[in-house]
Amino acid sequence: MTTNFTEVDKAVSLFSAVPKKYNCAQSVAMAFGRDDLVAPLKTCGGGRAEGGLCGALHATLLLLPENKWETVKKQFHDRAGNTLCRIIRREGNTPCVECVRIAANLVTELQNQP
């Protein structure tokens, strides 16, 4: 049985590597072959993106056409719910792996739509 290593798997793997080389935003960009976004997204992650956006969501927006951004934001927030890092950071939790997975799934789904 052969398993396909998807962009979602790659994004999670890149983010979960120890020691960490990429933050959540960079991991999503790298998984989809957008090496040009890695340096610009260096300081983006853990809710540090412009306007307090989740880094993984920020990368997702940059990977998709602007006319899909509002849809992406809504879908991301619907799926992430209260796992968003800026919401539960007070408790010291960092559910970024789940955010990376959600973001990569959204990019995959929306890139496959006509």
Image (tube, rainbow, N blue to C red):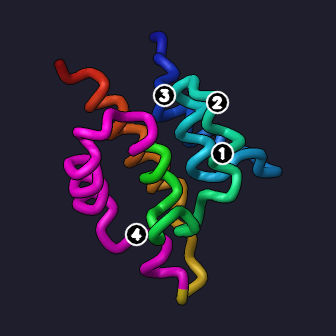
Q: Which mark is residue 40?
A: 1
| Residue annotated with mark 4 | 83
Q: CA distance from mark 3 to mark 4?
A: 21 Å
Q: Does residue 35 show up magenta in the picture?
A: no
| Residue annotated with mark 3 | 7
Type of the residue with mark 4 = Thr
Residues at circles 3 and 2 in contact by the CB criterion of under 8 Å: no
Q: Residues within 10 Å of mark 1 (few under 14, many from 20)?
A: few
The percent position of residue 74, horizontal first and vertical second, equals 22, 57
Residues 53 and 46: in front is 53
Secondary structure found at label 2 = helix
Type of the residue with mark 1 = Pro
Part of the protein shown in magenta:
61-89
Type of the residue with mark 2 = Asp
Q: Residues within 10 Å of mark 4 (few under 14, many from 20)?
A: some
User: In what quadrant of the picture does the C terminus appear?
Assistant: top left
Query: Which one is earlier in the sequence, the residue at label 4 or at label 2?
Result: 2
Residues at circles 1 and 2 in contact by the CB criterion of under 8 Å: yes
Q: Which mark is residue 48?
A: none
> In the image, 48: left or right of 71?
right
> In the image, 27: left or right of 86?
right
Q: Does residue 83 show up magenta in the picture?
A: yes
Type of the residue with mark 3 = Glu
